[in-house]
Image: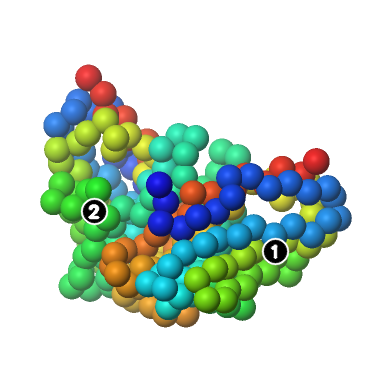
């Protein structure tokens, strides 16, 4: 059974930093790309960032480019999101999601086929 | 404002068939395959349908997807009260080099 468990969320002041983690199990972690998707409470979904199986390619939404960094440790079956220069508009529930293929996108494959339960990030003074 | 356009709400009665639309551009729906997600209240999104005709195991065949040109749609037949949820479309955008979501459609079973 695929399981994705996020951690590391919390309350942080504007301009601060936070590092999210996602522990994966139940599948060959190093065979798949991984992603972060966020959701402002009561609002829609926004893709944040993705990384391919080997960490050779990482992509970001324009809204976080230059401030967030995605990484993974295949030996630990873990995905990370380093968030710097946080803003109030980054307040959201952050989901870790498994990609449907080895890369950040593959034609004909599912975008995000399994999701964690999310970790909440609140940016406020 | 979302790159993909969905109606904010939809409704139907038990047993009815409802469809939810998702409108995009050549660079996304016109080129790549659409994914559909169901988000029940207080839970994480769940993959419902992808790549023209792919349904993950465990998803009832009451759910089906289609796409043509720059539009896609999700159809739910034999509507049940358990289907009350938010539904999202998502697709890769070649121009933005990013994944994009629709704004979501809240389905109410009357």
Q: Position of residue A30 (x, y in %)?
A: 31, 72
Which residue occupies 38% across, 50% down?
Answer: A46
Q: Badge 1, how many Cα within 10 Å: few under 14, some, many 20+?
A: some
Q: Tell which subunit mark 2 falls on.
A: A
Q: Residue furthest right?
A: B15
Please say if the residues under marks 1 and 2 sit with CB atoms less than 8 Å apart: no
- Image quadrant for the C terminus of chain B? top right
Q: Count how many numbered circles sit on residues in the image.
A: 2
- Looking at the rendered structure, which numbered label has been put on residue B75? 1
Can the viewer see residue A120? yes
Can the viewer see residue A118? no
What is the spatial separation of the Cα atoms under label 1 and label 2, in whole angstroms? 32 Å
Which residue occupies 83% across, 56% down?
Answer: B16
Which residue occupies 25% across, 48% down?
Answer: A63
Callout 1: SS: strand
Q: Pointer 2: what residue?
A: A62
Comparing B14 with A12, the one in front is: B14
Callout 2: SS: loop
Q: Quadrant of residue A94?
A: top left
Q: Position of residue A108 (x, y in %)?
A: 47, 80
- Looking at the rendered structure, which numbered label has been put on residue B110? none
Q: Position of residue A62 (x, y in %)?
A: 23, 53
């Amino acid at each position: 059974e695929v399981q994705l468990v996020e951690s590391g969320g919390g309350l942080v002041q504007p301009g601060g930093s936070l590092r999210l983690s996602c522990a994966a199990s139940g599948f060959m972690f190093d065979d798949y790309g991984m992603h972060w998707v966020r959701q402002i409470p009561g609002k829609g979904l926004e893709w944040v960032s993705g990384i391919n199986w080997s960490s050779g390619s990482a992509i970001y939404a324009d809204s976080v480019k230059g401030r967030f960094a995605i990484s993974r440790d295949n030996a630990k079956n873990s995905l990370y999101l380093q968030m710097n220069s946080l803003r109030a508009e980054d307040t959201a529930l952050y989901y870790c999601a498994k990609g449907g293929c080895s890369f950040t996108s593959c034609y004909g494959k599912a975008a995000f086929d399994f999701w964690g339960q999310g970790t909440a990030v609140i940016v406020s003074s | 404002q979302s790159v993909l356009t969905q109606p904010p709400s939809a409704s139907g009665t038990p047993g009815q068939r409802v469809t939810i639309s998702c409108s995009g551009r050549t660079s996304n729906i016109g080129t790549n395959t659409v994914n559909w997600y169901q988000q029940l209240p207080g839970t994480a999104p769940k993959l419902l349908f992808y790549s023209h005709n792919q349904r993950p195991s465990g998803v009832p065949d009451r759910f089906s997807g289609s796409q043509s040109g720059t539009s896609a749609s999700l159809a739910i037949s034999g509507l049940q009260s358990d289907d009350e949820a938010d539904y999202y479309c998502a697709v890769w955008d070649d121009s933005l080099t990013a994944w994009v979501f629709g704004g979501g459609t809240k389905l109410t079973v009357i």
